[in-house]
Image (tube, helix red, strand yellow):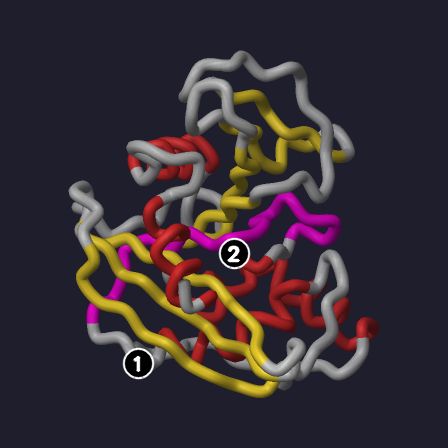
């Protein structure tokens, strides 16, 4: 798979902020999908050797039946510390290595992290989407920024996620009575479309099947 954009990977937070402020201007939050959607993918990262080595996993699934089509793994020394708001600099280098190995190009990638629901509007889903020019969705398990109204318990319920008077995402119930997920546009996809595809990728569990498969691969479970 071809990687379109590239930049030097930073060694300091200041350098990382400069990259985020630059790339945020390239993020597209309207639908630019290649339809029909035939393949969706998940990406995730695990760590070895007390965090010194990263193990990235990519899982490509057919859509809409969500069957595994292709997977890949890549290993790379971890080069950036864990700092909230800078996840992409820790995880994307190894994820790009894993993506370069796949032959089946996904139409949408669901990322285990934020999209524009990020202090500088460039979470891991945005960052990855801009680098590879593929539609991406941020599917986070926890809240990073923003506030929302109370969410009904039924699957499919959602409320806008607001930060500084801007709608940056949605809090979405993917399973009745279970903790919600935090959905935001990554790149080349609108929020309503992102919500629709996340729901279609979560037929049974809280997390999308793409994330579940990639997580198992990255964690070697």
Residue 107 belongs to magenta span: yes
Q: Residue at x 50, y 45 (%)?
A: 139
Contact (Cβ within 8 Å) of mark 1 with mark 2? no
Select label 1 or label 2 by which is in front: 1
Residue at horizontal 71 percent and vertical 81 percent from the top? 10
Looking at the image, which residue is at 45% across and 48% down? 137
Q: Kindly identify which numbered label has been placed on residue 123.
A: none
> Is 163 situated left or right of 174 in this image?
right
Q: Position of residue 80 (x, y in %)?
A: 70, 78
| Quadrant in which the N terminus appears | bottom left
Question: In the image shown, does 73 or 48 lie closer to the viewer?
Answer: 48
Instruction: Give the residue at mark 1.
Output: 101
Q: Residues within 10 Å of mark 2 (few under 14, many from 20)?
A: many
Instruction: Read off the magenta span.
Output: 104-121
Quick one: 208 or 123, which is closer to the camera? 208
Image spot of residue 157 (x, y percent): 47, 18
Circle 2 residue: 125
Vertical placement of residue 218 versus 149, above or below = below
Most common SS among magenta residues: loop
Expressed as whole percent of the image width and height from the top left, the position of residue 163 reads 73, 34
Count of numbered badges drawn on the protein: 2
Q: Does the rendering let one see residue 37? A: no
As for residue 117 lying within the magenta part, the answer is yes
- Helix, strand or loop status at disc 1: loop
Identify the residue at image location x=21%, y=75%: 103
């Amino acid at each position: 798979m071809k990687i379109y954009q590239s930049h030097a990977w930073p060694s300091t937070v200041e350098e990382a902020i400069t990259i985020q402020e630059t790339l945020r201007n390239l993020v597209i939050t309207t639908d630019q999908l290649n339809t029909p959607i035939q393949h969706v993918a998940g990406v995730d990262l695990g760590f070895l050797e007390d965090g010194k080595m990263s193990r990235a996993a990519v899982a490509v699934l057919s859509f809409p039946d969500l069957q595994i089509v292709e997977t890949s793994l890549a290993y790379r020394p971890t080069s950036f510390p864990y700092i909230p708001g800078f996840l992409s600099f820790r995880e994307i280098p190894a994820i790009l290595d894993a993506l370069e190995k796949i032959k089946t190009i996904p139409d949408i990638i669901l990322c285990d992290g934020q999209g524009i629901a990020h202090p500088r509007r460039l979470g891991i889903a945005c960052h990855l989407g801009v680098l590879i020019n593929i539609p991406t969705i941020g599917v986070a398990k926890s809240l990073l920024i923003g506030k929302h109204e109370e969410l009904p318990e039924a699957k499919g319920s959602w409320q806008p996620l607001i930060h500084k008077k801007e709608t940056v995402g949605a809090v979405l119930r993917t399973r009745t009575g279970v903790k919600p997920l935090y959905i935001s546009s990554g790149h080349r996809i609108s929020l309503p479309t992102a919500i629709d595809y996340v729901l279609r990728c979560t037929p049974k569990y809280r997390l999308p099947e793409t994330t579940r498969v990639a997580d198992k691969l990255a964690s070697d479970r």
